[in-house]
Amino acid sequence: MCWPRAALPSSLTNERQGRLMWFDQVPGKSWGSLWSGYVLCTGVCHGIREIDASCPACGADPFDTSPETMTIDGRTMVIGRAFPGAEGRYEDYVYLEMLQREWERPAVEFQRFSHFADAKRPSARVALVLLFWSYFETRIERLHRTAMRALPQRVLDDALRRHQGIHSRLYELYKIFFGVSYFDDLRNQGFHEIANLLEKTHKCRNEFSHGKPQAINDELVNELVENLKAEHHSWIAVYNSRV
């Protein structure tokens, strides 16, 4: 059976050659679970670490997760330990939930462009790519602000103001701070495919914004969703190498 590109059933979009997608294997199948198990290092490094592993940024030992015994108002209580989550803001979860909503939206809602030729048809899920890029930009700003926190606040704010565009923050400003572009930083960490995907997404997003809506097609949407967890992991790796 031949399915229109904008109406692929979930059994096909969620599975590639017999293997499950990453979001079929996360807690609650919630995309917000990409942050599950990650916490902030409680030292001075501001690193992002898994709760049961050493900090990749400063090498601090794994956290003690055993319950604590405390005495409160004369009563002895056993309390589970709590650690600060690694997400930058509550809005991180909002972005991820919005991405999931766009992916799971019934395909029947997107038939308006089904008669367009493949080369002229934008993906029915264009909004997913635009949402992802907005979320990506917030994480790039977080990386800059955390890694360069030793600068006087006014100096850092001015640098980010002068380099407000994401292109500048990925290239010019990134090279000023770290000597390489963000994409080369990814490649230096071993994430060559993710770097290539993000460069392509950046290019297609710009073309979309300048009069070429078909630049964001189903192929890009599917590739981005399939690699969303890997992209998330790659950003954490680069972040930890810089903070």
Image (cartoon, grey):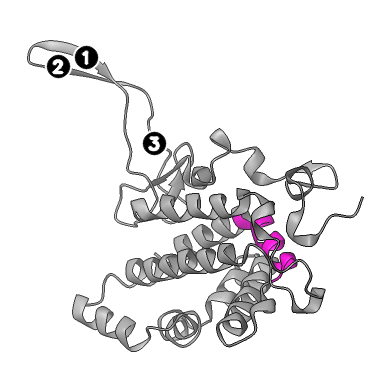
In whole angstroms, how far apart are the C-alphas of marks 3 and 2? Answer: 22 Å
Secondary structure category for the residue under label 2? strand
Do the numbered discs 2 and 1 sit on residues whose CB atoms are within 8 Å? Answer: yes
The one of 19 and 115 positioned closer to us in this rendering? 115
Instruction: Decide if residue 187 is on the left or right side of residue 97.
Output: right
> Which residue position is annotated with label 1?
77
Q: In which quarter of the image is residue 204?
A: bottom right
Magenta highlight: main SS: helix
State yes or no: residue 220 in magenta: yes
- Please report whichever mark, 3 or 2, sits nearer to the chain's N-terminal start: 3
> Which residue position is annotated with label 2?
71
Q: Residues within 10 Å of mark 1 (few under 14, many from 20)?
A: few
Q: Residues within 10 Å of mark 2 (few under 14, many from 20)?
A: few
Q: Identify which amino acid the numbered label 3 is placed on.
A: Phe
Residue 128 image offset from top left, x and y in percent: 57, 62
Residue 209 position (above or below residue 66): below
Q: Give the range drawn in magenta.
A: 217-228
Q: In which quarter of the image is residue 88?
A: bottom left
Instruction: Decide if residue 234 is on the left or right side of residue 215.
Output: left
For the image shown, how many numbered marks are present on the structure? 3
Q: Identify which amino acid the numbered label 2 is placed on.
A: Thr
- Please report whichever mark, 1 or 3, sits nearer to the chain's N-terminal start: 3
